[in-house]
Amino acid sequence: MTILTFTLILLIGAYLAGLLGSLTGLGGGVVVIPLLTLVFQVDIRYAIGAALLASIANSSGAASAYVKEGITNIRLGMFLEIATTIGAVIGAVLAVYTPTNTIAILFGVILLFSAAMTLRRKNQEALTEGSKLASVLKLNGSYPTKDGVVHYKLKNVGAGFSIMTVAGILSGLLGIGSGALKVLAMDSAMRIPFKVSTTTSNFMIGVTAAASAVVYLQRGYMDPAIAFPVVLGVLGGAFTGSKLLTRMDPKVLKYIFCVAIIFVAAEMMYNGFNHKF
Amino acid sequence: MKKVKGLLADHDIEVIVGTLLRYGVMTASAIVLLGGIYFLFQHGQAPVPSYHHFVGESIGYTTFSGIVEGATALQAKAIIQLGVMVLIATPILRILFSLIGFTLEKDKLYIGITLVVLCVILLSTFGGLKI
C-alpha cells in the first residue's frame, strides 16, 4: 500500500469516526483507536496519540456551536476540568508503565461501558432543588429550549467530581475523551438535564485531551503522517454531525452503533488477551 | 439589574469562547492540510512505513523548537506537526480566554478555579513529564 492510499482510506475512516462520535456524543477517539489498531495494524501507542488529537478536534469543532447557543454550562465545565485535567496527567504518566495489551483490554471494557451508557434512559428533568455546594460554586444554570428558558439545579457535586477524576485518568491512559463517564457523572450523579450534560462533556473533552496530549506529543506518540488524515477526517465528520444533530434524533443510529461497538470491544479484548498488541 | 448584567457578560464570554474554538480549529486544520498535501506530493507513492512496531518520533517532531525549526525549513511533516501543536493549544487558549472573562466579571471564585486548571496543563507541558 502506498502512503497516498493509506492516507485516503484513513481519511474516510476518520470522517465516519467523527460523524459517529459527534452524533452519539462519545467522541471520535473511541472509533479511531480500533480503526487504527484492528484495521490498519498500527501500534496502539500511535493510535492513542492520534485519538487524542481526534478528541480535541471533535470537541472543539462541535463545542463552538453549542457554546454559542448557550446550552453549555461553562462554569460547571471549568470546575470539573480541575478533576479531569489532573486525572489526564496521571493517566498519561500511568500509560508509560502499562503494557499495551492491558491498555487494549481496558479499552475494550470502556467501549462496552460506553455502549451501555448510550442505551440507558436519559435524564430529561431539571431539578428545582439543588445542593448547597452547587449553589456556592455557582454551578446551577439555565439553557434555552423551544418552550423557553429552563432553569436547573444540581446535586452530588462531590460524587460528580470523583467520577470526573476517573474519567480524566482513563482519558489520559487510553487517549479517548471518556465522554460516557463524563455524562455519567453529570447525568446520573449530578442530575443535570441531558442536553446540558452532553454539550458540557463535549466542551470539556478538548481541555482534558490537551492536558495529556502535550505529554504524548513530547513522548513521540504523535506521528504526523497519521495525524494528518485523522485530524482532518474527524473534524469534517464532527462538523457534519453537529449540523445533522439539530435536524434529527439519531436514535436508530445509536442502536446500530452500540451493536457494532460490542463486536469491536470483544475484538480488542480478545487481541489483548492473546498479546497481539 | 445586577443579574441581567451578569447574564449578558456570561453570554459575551460564550460567544468569544465559541469563536476562539472555531478559529483555532480552522487554523490548525488549514496548517495540517497544507503540510499534508505537501507531504503526499513528496512521499505519496512511497510504501507505508511499518506502524506496527512502535519506534516513536524523532526529536524534530516532539519539541516546540524542533517542530518550529522544521516547519520554517518547509519540511512537510514538521508543518503537519505545527498544525497539531496549534490544535492542542486551542483548548488551552480557551482556558486563558475564560480567565480573562471571569476577571472582567470579577468572579474571584472562578478566577481561582480557572487558574488551577491552567496550572495543571502548564505543569504537564513544561514540568518535564517526558519520562
Image: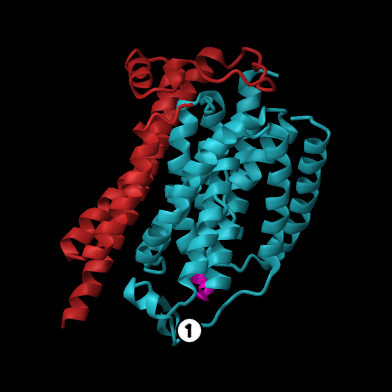
Q: Would residue A91 appear left or right of A204 to someone viewing this image?
A: right
Residue A85: x and y in percent read: 44, 49
In magenta, the rendered stretch is A190-195
Q: Which residue is mark 1?
A: A127
Chain B's colour is red
Chain A's colour is cyan
Is residue B20 in view? no
Picture layout, residue B58 above or below residue A100: above
Picture layout, residue A73 above or below residue A23: below
Residue at screen point 21% across, 80% down: B3
Residue at screen point 39% across, 22% down: B63
Element type at mark 1: loop
Q: Would residue A16 appear left or right of A234 to someone viewing this image?
A: right
Residue A263: x and y in percent read: 80, 49
Residue at screen point 26% across, 67% down: B10
Q: Does residue B129 show up magenta in the picture?
A: no
Q: Looking at this view, is B50 or A146 the one in front?
A: B50
Using the rendered view, name the quadrant where residue B83 is placed: top left
In the displayed orientation, state which residue is furthest to the bottom.
Answer: A128
Parent chain of label 1: A
Q: Would residue B122 appear left or right of A13 to someone viewing this image?
A: left
Residue at screen point 59% across, 59% down: A181
Q: Amino acid at mark 1?
A: Leu
Classify the position of the N terminus of chain B by image quarter. Answer: bottom left
